[in-house]
Image: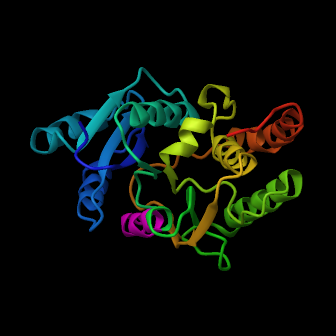
């Protein structure tokens, strides 16, 4: 039994500096959201903090613990399946480190609930480049990665690697989640590509992305390498798939 029809999935690994504050901020929004934390065996005690918070918010706060770092993509797939099994209608994904402003959850939700989007994307590049506290090299790499993805796939989405999103459950019911192969940024791209190929309505909502203030970044060169080659493989394999709702 869900406390609301809306769920925010937050994957974590060593986020003890942020986890209590981000959960509290999500619960403070005018739109009611439940929260599902998917923790990949954080040795810093992130899951223990969540368990303490569950004592006073057990109906709204949920925790899935996994044995070690199994990848961002598999964390979200696990969360999506859990959300569908538990009857949620709108399922959001966001980071734990406040790079995504919890107040923007309301705008993503409204885009789906009121404006008819099947997928709402919190976009860093819909209205210029709205990134705060990133080195210029990382901004350029991210921006041109999205340009590259648009060229290869044909999607018109400005922020193809965005990880701040809200899905209507019918999208996740339609996409064959077990067939999603990419993990890091590649996972975010593949989910958008599949949503687009199935013909669902996608809306980009401009946001300001602010780099984390607490804890350590999980970024690695391998994530971009996977996205670079994975997008080409994804595009080629799409020629042999049927996208029928």
**x, y percent for residue 220:** 64, 43
Give the magenta range. 101-110
**x, y percent for residue 224:** 73, 45
* Residue nearest the observer in this picture, 55 or 80: 80
Direction from residue 52 to residue 44 in the image, left or right: right
Looking at the image, can residue 45 be seen? no
Residue at 30 percent across and 58 percent down: it is 26
**x, y percent for residue 10:** 41, 45
* Residue lying at the far left of the rendered structure: 56
Query: Does the segment drawn in magenta span residue 104?
Result: yes
Direction from residue 210 to residue 18 in the image, left or right: left
Direction from residue 240 to residue 33 in the image, left or right: left
* Residue nearest the observer in this picture, 23 or 45: 23
Direction from residue 57 to residue 217 in the image, left or right: right
Q: Is residue 52 above or below residue 181?
A: below
Looking at the image, can residue 168 be seen? yes
Q: Is residue 45 above or below residue 132?
A: above
Query: Does the segment drawn in magenta span residue 78?
Result: no
- The picture quadrant where one finds residue 60 is top left
Q: Is residue 166 above or below residue 207?
A: above
In the picture, the quarter occupied by the C terminus is top right
Residue at 41 percent across and 40 percent down: it is 12
Residue at 51 percent across and 49 percent down: it is 217
């Amino acid at each position: 039994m869900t406390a609301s029809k809306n769920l925010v999935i937050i994957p974590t690994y060593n986020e003890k500096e942020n986890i209590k504050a981000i959960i509290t901020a999500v619960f403070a929004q005018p739109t009611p959201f439940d929260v599902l934390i998917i923790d990949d065996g954080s040795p810093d005690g992130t899951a223990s903090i969540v368990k303490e918070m569950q004592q006073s918010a057990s109906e709204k706060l949920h925790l899935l613990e996994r044995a070690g770092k199994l990848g961002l993509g598999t964390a979200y797939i696990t969360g999506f399946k859990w959300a569908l099994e538990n009857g949620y209608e709108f399922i959001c994904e966001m980071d734990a480190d406040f790079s995504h402003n919890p107040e923007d959850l309301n705008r993503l939700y409204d885009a789906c609930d009121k404006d008819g989007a099947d997928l709402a994307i919190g976009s860093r590049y819909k209205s210029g480049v709205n990134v705060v506290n990133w080195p210029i090299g990382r901004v350029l790499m991210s921006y041109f990665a999205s340009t590259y993805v648009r060229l290869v796939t044909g999607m018109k989405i400005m922020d193809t690697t965005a990880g701040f999103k809200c899905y209507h459950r019918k999208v996740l019911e339609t996409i064959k989640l077990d067939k999603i192969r990419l993990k890091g940024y590649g996972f975010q791209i593949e989910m958008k590509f599949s949503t687009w190929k199935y013909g669902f309505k996608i809306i980009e909502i401009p946001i300001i992305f602010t780099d984390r203030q607490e804890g350590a970044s999980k970024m690695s060169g391998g994530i971009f390498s996977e996205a670079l080659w994975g997008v080409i493989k994804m595009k080629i394999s799409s020629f042999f798939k049927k996208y029928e709702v």
